[in-house]
Structure formats: structure tokens, C-alpha cells
Image (spheres, helix red, strand yellow):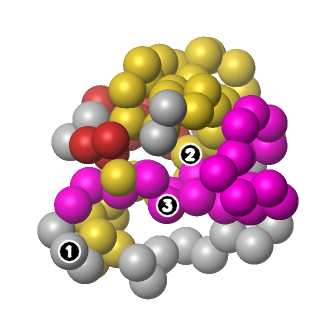
Amino acid sequence: MNQTIFNAIRNMHVLSLTYNGIARMVEPHAYGVSKAGNDVLRCYQPVGGHIKPGHEWELLSVSEITALSDTQAKFSGARYGYSRDDKAMTRIYAQL
């Protein structure tokens, strides 16, 4: 389990990271294990590069995240469209 992601969810801190070569700022909402057995992060990306324009919700494979850091910047809470107990996860480490 990645403690940085866990703490960012608990404290509602924005994460800075690189995924698929794209720098991103994300609001982490849920962190757990996918049905395939991989650690994943459900996050909302209000700014930064997108692979698909207009696609703010992401399910990122934690093993593919690089340059991860907690910005210490707070976000206000769960974004519209978020559902607790993410169905893409079989086990949840942390969630809003």
C-alpha cells in the first residue's frame, strides 16, 4: 500500500503525479485493489493533461504512476459523480 496516496485521501490533499507520460494534478477519491489484483487509484483530475479531453474521472494503475507527491493543497471533498465502494475495486484501502 502506498502511504502517500492513503494519507492524501484521508487529508483531502491534491496529488501531483505523472501517468502515461502526462503530468497531472488529481484529487484522490478511492484507493484499492482492482478485480485484476492491481492497486488502483480512482481520482478526479480538474486540471492537467488528459489522454481523452473532457475525461475528468480516472482509474489509474498505481504501478504506472511516477513522480508522485502530496502537494498539501486541500480539496473540498467528493466531486459530483463519485460513488463510495467503487465497483471496480475488490478491496478498498481508503476512500472519501
User: Can residue 75 be seen by looking at this rendering?
Assistant: no
Is residue 19 found left or right of 89 in the rendered image? Answer: right
**Where does the image place residue 18, in percent across and percent down from the top left?**
50, 29
Above or below, 20 against 13 in this view is below
Magenta stretch: dominant secondary structure: strand
| Residue designated by label 3 | 59
Query: Which residue is depicted at the point 49% across and 32% down?
Result: 21
- Does the residue at mark 3 contact the one at mark 1 (Cβ under 8 Å)? no
**Where does the image place residue 14, in percent across and percent down from the top left?**
64, 30
| Residue designated by label 1 | 36
Inspect the image, locate mark 1, and give the three-letter code of the amino acid beneath it: Ala
What is the C-alpha distance between the residues marked 2 and 3? 10 Å
Residue range (magenta): 38-60
**Where does the image place residue 92, in percent across and percent down from the top left?**
32, 64
Is residue 21 found left or right of 74 in the rendered image? Answer: left
First in sequence: mark 3 vs mark 1: 1
Inspect the image, locate mark 3, and give the three-letter code of the amino acid beneath it: Leu
First in sequence: mark 2 vs mark 3: 2
| Label 2 Cα neighbours within 10 Å, binned few <14 / some 14-19 / many ≥20 | many
**SS for callout 1:** loop
Quadrant for residue 91, please give it. Answer: bottom left
- On-image quarter of the N terminus: top left
| Label 1 Cα neighbours within 10 Å, binned few <14 / some 14-19 / many ≥20 | few
